[in-house]
Image (cartoon, grey):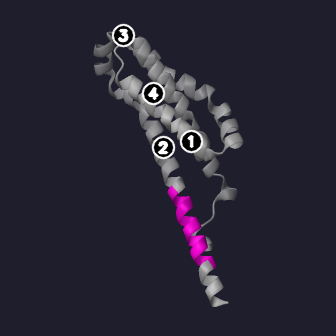
């Protein structure tokens, strides 16, 4: 009887570690998402010189991220519910990384816009998943999961 309890506790602790690990990955993706949102503002002089554009054009470049980000919020939730978070977040983070590469290697303004749109598209999935993780019903306190 005691051995069964130890196995049960080990299973719960392993499950808890896996949950925290997945939560950590999603949280890092969300932090990365926020950094991608604000970094054009920090690079305004460099972007202005690289693209030879005015401040209004750079504002539009920054807004491309938010357009894709905002439009994809509802479809992101539907896709995560339909296909599961593992595959959807993997694809979304890959799209976000491709967008970062395109934006970082952009020589023209239009290529930069495409990169920012892809970054916004991929990053929109992070917020939806983090909000789902913050659902109070799904949170299991560590002391109840390992020490029942």
Horizontal side of residue 7 vs 45, given as left or right: right
Within 10 angstroms of label 2, few (less than 14), some, or many (20 or more) residues? many
Which residue is the site of mark 2?
A: 29
Find the magenta span and give its range. Answer: 8-21
State the residue in front, 17 or 87: 87
Per the model, the C-alpha gap separating discs 1 and 4 is 15 Å
Which residue is the site of mark 4?
A: 99
State the residue in front, 111 or 3: 3
Instruction: Kindly report which numbered mark, 3 or 1, lies closer to the viewer in this rendering.
Output: 1
Q: Earlier in the sequence, mark 3 or mark 4?
A: 3
Q: Earlier in the sequence, mark 2 or mark 3?
A: 2
* Location of residue 108 with respect to 65 vertically, above or below: above
Marks 3 & 1, CB-CB < 8 Å contact: no
Per the model, the C-alpha gap separating discs 3 and 4 is 23 Å
Q: What is the magenta segment's predominant secondary structure?
A: helix
Residue 115 at x, y = what percent?
Answer: 45, 23
Marks 2 & 1, CB-CB < 8 Å contact: yes
């Amino acid at each position: 009887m005691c051995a069964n309890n130890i196995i049960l506790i080990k299973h719960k602790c392993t499950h808890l570690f896996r949950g925290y690990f997945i939560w950590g990955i999603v949280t890092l993706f969300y932090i990365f998402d926020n950094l991608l949102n604000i970094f054009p503002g920090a690079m305004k002089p460099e972007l202005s010189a690289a693209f030879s554009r005015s401040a209004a054009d750079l504002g539009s470049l920054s807004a491309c991220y938010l357009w894709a980000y905002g439009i994809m919020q509802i479809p992101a939730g539907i896709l995560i519910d339909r296909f599961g978070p593992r595959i959807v977040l993997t694809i979304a983070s890959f799209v976000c990384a491709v967008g970062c590469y395109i934006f970082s290697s952009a020589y023209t303004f239009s290529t930069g816009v495409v990169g920012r749109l892809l970054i916004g598209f991929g990053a929109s999935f992070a917020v939806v998943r983090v909000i789902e993780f913050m659902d109070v019903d799904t949170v299991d306190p560590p002391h109840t999961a390992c020490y029942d």
